[in-house]
Image (cartoon, rainbow, N blue to C red):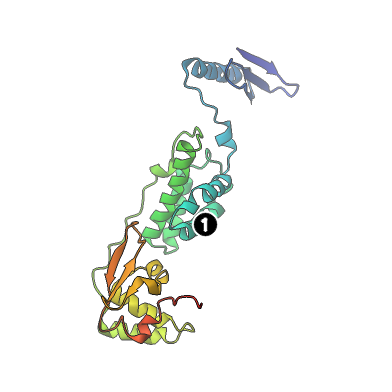
Amino acid sequence: MAYIRQYANGRWQAVVRRRGYPSKSESFTSRKDAVQWARSVETKVDGGTYSDRSLAERTTMAAAIDRYLEEVTPGKRSARSETQRLNQLRRIFGKHTLVTLQREEIAKYRDQRLRDRKAPGTVIKDLNTLSHVFEVAIKDWGLPLPGNPVKLVRRPKASRGRDRRITPEEYERLKAACKESRSPLLVPIVVLAVETAMRLGELLSLRWSDIDLDRRVAKLDMTKNGDSRVVPLSTLTALTPTAIRAVRRPPEP
């Protein structure tokens, strides 16, 4: 049953106790509010719909993101980029709790990122990552949140994919600019990228054991979609000594 009492400072406290449930208490400025709250909690408990939101109300976004980084992110192939994204979100939303972060604040973040000339695709990834933190908190951690506020935020329209290939003149200018870099591997990496259309992560993970010079192919064991694939290598450029230097050499014996 509910217990109502008044403090010396004039505020009222309502305490609800039910067998099988931890006691729940709140303080109010009036006795009427205390009684209404107690009756509401009792009705939910008796109907089996009561859930204690105190843990969710105390959990900050910083704490939730830290737990996500520890438990969820390490199992992803995109762990490095996701860690950077989550650290950014932590700086912006860390002081909010899981309950107090509202869609209005998230929409303001979206608009500011777009004003900062971030690509719509980047902003979409930010929102999707933040949304998944809420989903994990609800489904895996069992936090009784009222909902996922990120789902209520409209995503920006993604940019259209590229529909043309670099021209020969642009390619020569690009290589000339890359030669100004202090990295001797920038030019061969660009050559391989243009000739194979491989992603940056795929290029950087390439090993000599992945290259078959006789068949003129490179085998990628792990790609963005999780499947392996074989990439043809050009006879004109990708197999020249300059381009092959971009592939990581085996360790010295």
Residue pointed to by mark 1: 88
Figure quadrant of residue 12: top right
Q: Does residue 240 sit above or below 207 in this rendering? A: below
Side of 24 where 175 appears, left or right: left
Image location of residue 196, percent across then percent down: 29, 73
Q: Residue at x 40, y 76 (%)?
A: 247
Q: Residue at x 42, y 80 (%)?
A: 186
Q: Residue at x 45, y 43 (%)?
A: 103
In the rendered image, the residue lying farthest to the top is 1
Q: Does residue 186 sit above or below 54 in this rendering? A: below
Residue neighbourhood size for the residue with mark 1, other residues' Cα within 10 Å, grouped as few (<14), some (14–19), many (≥20): few
Quarter of the image where the N terminus is located:
top right
Badge 1 element:
helix
In the rendered image, the residue lying farthest to the front is 253
Foreground pick, 154 / 134: 134
Image location of residue 75, percent across then percent down: 46, 52
Q: Does residue 197 sit above or below 66 in this rendering? A: below
Side of 110 where 53 appears, left or right: right
Count of all numbered marks drawn on residues in the image: 1
Foreground pick, 142 / 236: 236
Side of 211 where 73 appears, left or right: right
Image location of residue 94, percent across then percent down: 57, 49
Foreground pick, 191 / 113: 191
Figure quadrant of residue 228: bottom left
Q: Amino acid at mark 1?
A: Gln
Foreground pick, 136 / 45: 136
Q: Does residue 212 sit above or below 181 in this rendering? A: above
In the rendered image, the residue lying farthest to the left is 163
Figure quadrant of residue 126: bottom left
